[in-house]
Amino acid sequence: MTQLEELKTLLAEISDLTAVSQLVSWDKETQMPKGGAASRANQLSTLARLLHQKNTSSEIKNLLTALEPELGNKDSLDGALIRLLRLEFERRSKLPTDFVADFAKARSEAGTVWEASRHQNNWAAFLPHLEKMFSMARRSADYYGYDSHPYDALLWDYDPGLKTADIKQIFADVRTFTVPLLERIVAAGEKVDYSVLTRSFPLEAQRAFSLEVAQAFGYDLQHGRLDVTAHPFATNFSKDDVRITTRFDEHYFPMAFYGVLHEAGHAMYEQNTADELRRTPLARGAWSTAHESQSRLWENLVGRSSGFWQHWFHLAQKHFPQALHDVDAATMYKLVNRVKPSLIRVEADELTYNLHIMLRFELELAIFEDKLKVSELPEAWNAKMQEYLGVTPPDYASGVMQDIHWSAGLFAYFPTYSLGNILSVQLFNKASSQMGDLNAMFARGEYQPLLHWLTHAVLRHGKTYLPPELIQKATGEPLSAKYYLAYLEQKFSGIYGL
Amino acid sequence: MTQLEELKTLLAEISDLTAVSQLVSWDKETQMPKGGAASRANQLSTLARLLHQKNTSSEIKNLLTALEPELGNKDSLDGALIRLLRLEFERRSKLPTDFVADFAKARSEAGTVWEASRHQNNWAAFLPHLEKMFSMARRSADYYGYDSHPYDALLWDYDPGLKTADIKQIFADVRTFTVPLLERIVAAGEKVDYSVLTRSFPLEAQRAFSLEVAQAFGYDLQHGRLDVTAHPFATNFSKDDVRITTRFDEHYFPMAFYGVLHEAGHAMYEQNTADELRRTPLARGAWSTAHESQSRLWENLVGRSSGFWQHWFHLAQKHFPQALHDVDAATMYKLVNRVKPSLIRVEADELTYNLHIMLRFELELAIFEDKLKVSELPEAWNAKMQEYLGVTPPDYASGVMQDIHWSAGLFAYFPTYSLGNILSVQLFNKASSQMGDLNAMFARGEYQPLLHWLTHAVLRHGKTYLPPELIQKATGEPLSAKYYLAYLEQKFSGIYGL
């Protein structure tokens, strides 16, 4: 075996174990009987320990050092592999193994408590676990090290190279644009009867219709499946087994439907990474901003387009004859694009969605800057909700406890949703410039050409490129919010007749 | 950390990984999309490799050697742990790691092909995989080494100490007894209308009723769940998460129902091992004979008793009002105890069941003795079916391809089902001698006292004792078929008025 083959053998083993760890987590969320939680936390901790040992082993280190002179700067897959591995190796080596194992166990326990206490609206039960998550994340940041802000150290996991200061600037621009547009929309008033969406949409029909659409987009159920969880997510154990989850509300159609399209967007990313990346660290969608660009693209730019509803409305009517008998495609388009400040991020419209993200970003920053205590989060949350969106959560479950992320120790993740929105439009515009009128394609029920374009431009590369390189390569320029803001202006001016 | 603590830390990690490997296999059978099979085989192979490395590591060896002088002969849990570990360590160390990983991969692939080709009745597609399973099992036996028969080397995994010659003797006794009893039953003729059992039993009601009974026996669904698979099984990832599967046929009530009771028997074993065995190799039910004694006990000695149906029949009628409206408890008892030579082992009556086992045992022996080729199995199978049971399978699926075991490389497992039958009655008799009339208890709906007795006598010990010790300890004598044969004689004389 050459040294490169030796390295790839080790990486294949790590890749398998990583997949197994993902599967064990998926099972915890979707299948595990409640009584299995304590043992499951041990299992996840053991896997995390083992993976950390393997990822930071002297074998990996020595092979990396031996191969770097030849391959390190090469513009090839092997070169990209060596480069990524060096970045990840250096970063991971900064964390002590015991800390990694303890964090995994604490995360698993916090997730279990979050799910139960959210259900019971019990902030007090969740608080000590959330405090532990924040303090362990802070310890991670200290281990990793940073120049100007501990948050920078955490951002790396989700978007290497991104800085807190960059996000602040982008968010300021988006906010400056969003607030007046929102005011114009509110002033315009509502012109359709939104209660249509809260009629009865039988769950089985919701499931069938959502999957029909997701499959038409390109989500392959021979290599995927849909389950129900408290908080929707996508996960994968190889490009051959990419699973999504959602949650259903009989009396609110968009919840499960757009949830499925969102997660299918993530899933299609994983299903379309190149075969030659299999069982290497390159074989995953490129970090969070790129990943969210795909979920948000299929959810919003496709699923909330007028063309989409021109094609799908009659099929939706067949699935929901009672709820939709007196509606038409043009109205449906307006219904699913209602702009209205609301409590729940994942159900927010495209415009106010980013305000939910900014709120989380600012609260996370305040805690990492020691300006806010974790115990003060509910009050701070509600105050910001009132300030940004003019609404106040009636309970913790629809307020500070709504998202799974913090319970899973995922801090610095949220900003990538808004960056994903921005990137989704930038990619969409590039695709349109090369493919013509995408909305017309959607109206004809054609989605494969767009998936094909995205696969070629983004998906197939996995983690071969760092985010700025990938964006440059796919769109010919750096990440820019201008397309996104223009899109919002145009779309909602049209819908609300501004 | 003392050396003992150090060893237990290593064993806890191994225990977690073993659990994870079980979970990954469970997911493959129950949840995995079909397209995930190839990647899953890699993942299972990697886990097998890693577990083998950890189980045979020099750390384990050195700690074992250091601790043996003090603990090796001690009559304590730590002593039992050291003893078991030495036995398993020596055995495992004989297998090369690559072979273990390759076998795991081949098993996973064979299982996938078995399920698909059984469904298509395609023997030719399965044959090369089955040949591989036999030849790899044979290689295992050669690595392990043996005195008189390669089959002895394989038996160790399922019942350490058991010899091929012992099984031959016991099976000869059982057969000598069974054949004339079967002839008397056939001569007596059938007196009830068995078509009742093939009426419509709606699946949801089957599921609900089966689980109601299993829970009444003591299967804890807070720490368990039921799924559907081609071949029923039980598995566990800790005593806190013990899952069972079954398969349903709307027009054959006993299939799913007794399948659930059987697997619940296995599951209750695992759920009732002692807490102090957690995360050690002792924390599993004691090998296969003891395990099958529990599944067969709850399935047959409880679930097919007259007392059982006295209590449950009215509840069954509520679940299946149409199918059971013109039946009574006494008839139901006869219906579920019909003795009739048939094709499928897991649905066979208590009497002919052992003939199915003998057939498999003899075919396995013939192959390991090079008297039969794997390719000749279907013919040999059908000939023996005709000889022992007077029936001939119409297809491979209900003949040589019916069981999952061979596709999973499980050879030498089948005999433990019959030994489990024998042990189940020996335990049941011991329990009766101490607790009084168990059938009367079942008629009152009382099952916890029996579970409690079994837990005390058998379950809680996990793998603390080797099978002969456990049997001696629980019943006061070695394994003996006399109780079992007397039970069969009495039960079926009564039912058939012999």
Image (tube, coloured by chain):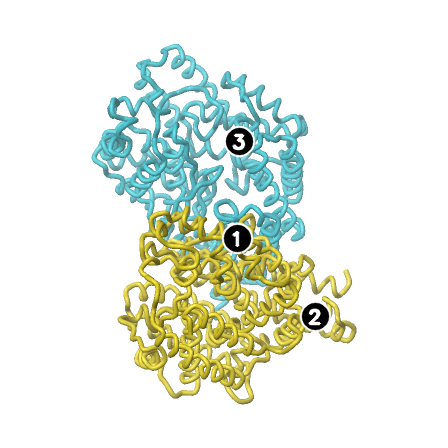
Chain colours: A yellow, B cyan
Q: Position of residue A266 (x, y in %)?
A: 53, 62
Callout in the foreground (2, 1): 2
How far across and down, in percent of the image, does residue A194 sit?
Answer: 33, 62
At a point 66% along the width and 71% down the height, the residue shown is: A465
Q: Which mark is residue B70?
A: none
Same chain for the residues under marks 2 and 1 in the image: no
Q: Which residue is mark 1?
A: B21
In this orientation, which residue lies closer to the viewer: A401 or B13? A401
Q: Is residue B105 above or below residue A491?
A: above
What residue type is disc 3 on?
A: Gln
Q: Which residue is mark 3?
A: B402
Q: Position of residue B207 (x, y in %)?
A: 35, 39
Q: Which chain hosts label 1?
A: B
Give the mark, 1 or 3, whose residue is nearer the N terminus: 1
Please identify, in this view, whether the residue under mark 3 or under mark 2 is nearer the observer: 2
Q: Which residue is mark 2?
A: A80
Mark 3 and 2 residues: CB-CB less than 8 Å, in contact? no
> In terms of depth relative to the viewer, which is nearer, A12 or B462?
A12
Secondary structure, mark 1, is helix
The reply to whether discs 2 and 1 touch (Cβ–Cβ < 8 Å) is no
A443 lies above or below B228: below
